Image (cartoon, rainbow, N blue to C red):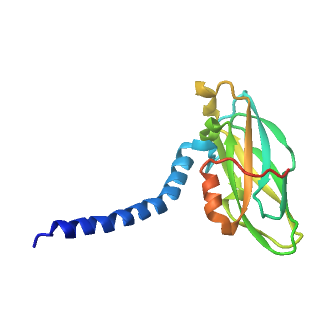
Amino acid sequence: MAMTKTARFGLIAGLVPLAMLGAAYAAVPLYQLFCQVTGYGGTTQVATEAASQVLTRTIQVRFDANVAPGVPWSFKPEKPVVSLKLGENGLAFYTVKNESNRPVTAVATYNVTPHKVGPYFQKLECFCFQDRTLQPGESMELPVIFYVDPSLATDRNVDEVTEVTLSYTFFEAGDKAIAQAQAGGAEPTVTTQ
């Protein structure tokens, strides 16, 4: 049985909004996946093992700490900068404290600048891989173990890079949509150091 033009038009008119809605829901996770795979927007990579070689070329890594509006935490790096060789494992600590009188669960988003270094910045372990809950007045040290991939030395597009900034922004866990948008490479909105 053939559909009439009116029925076909009605079906298409009903399916187009559904397809657009589905595309909207898929956009954020697909964009995140793209950024994680390519390092686009300064998205760092997750490494499963240390680098296979360490080069003599050094790079300075600066650490930046931010909290989104409404997150009642103080957050700062213990050391603002370290210098290490390409391929050498680095260990950095951040200190975070809940300054409020209520428990707060937050998630950290991250990126590196310059953004073109994202594909080379490898994290072996990071506090940003999971939500953190702090009780009122509680503080803790948060570690990140990382290295800058020695293959950076063969990329002529990053020859001038001698310094990288690793930046984190904490969002309340309920603000996942904002946090996900930030993880896609957007810059932090509020800095508290």
> Is the residue 157 above or below the residue 43 in the image?
above
User: x, y percentage for residue 162?
Assistant: 73, 29
Task: Give how far across and how far down residue 179 sits, in percent.
Answer: 65, 59
Task: Give x and y (percent) for residue 45.
Answer: 61, 47
Front-most of 23 and 131?
23
Taking the view exactly as shown, the residue that stands out farthest to the bottom is 102
Location of residue 112 (image quadrant): top right
Q: Residue furthest front?
A: 6
Residue at the (83%, 62%) spot, across then down:
73
Quarter of the view holding residue 55:
top right
Please give left or right for residue 20 compared with residue 83 in the image: left
Q: Residue at x 67, y 59 (%)?
A: 129
Residue at x-position 28% and y-position 64%: 12
What x and y, as percent, mark residue 127?
73, 58
Give the side of residue 178 with respect to residue 143, left or right: left
Quadrant of the rendered image containing residue 113? top right
The front one of 136 and 89 is 136
Q: Is residue 150 above or below residue 122?
A: above
The reply to whether residue 146 is in sight is: yes
Q: Residue at x 21, y 70 (%)?
A: 7
- State whether residue 52 appears in this view: no
Report the number of numbered marks. 0
Which quadrant is the N terminus positioned in? bottom left
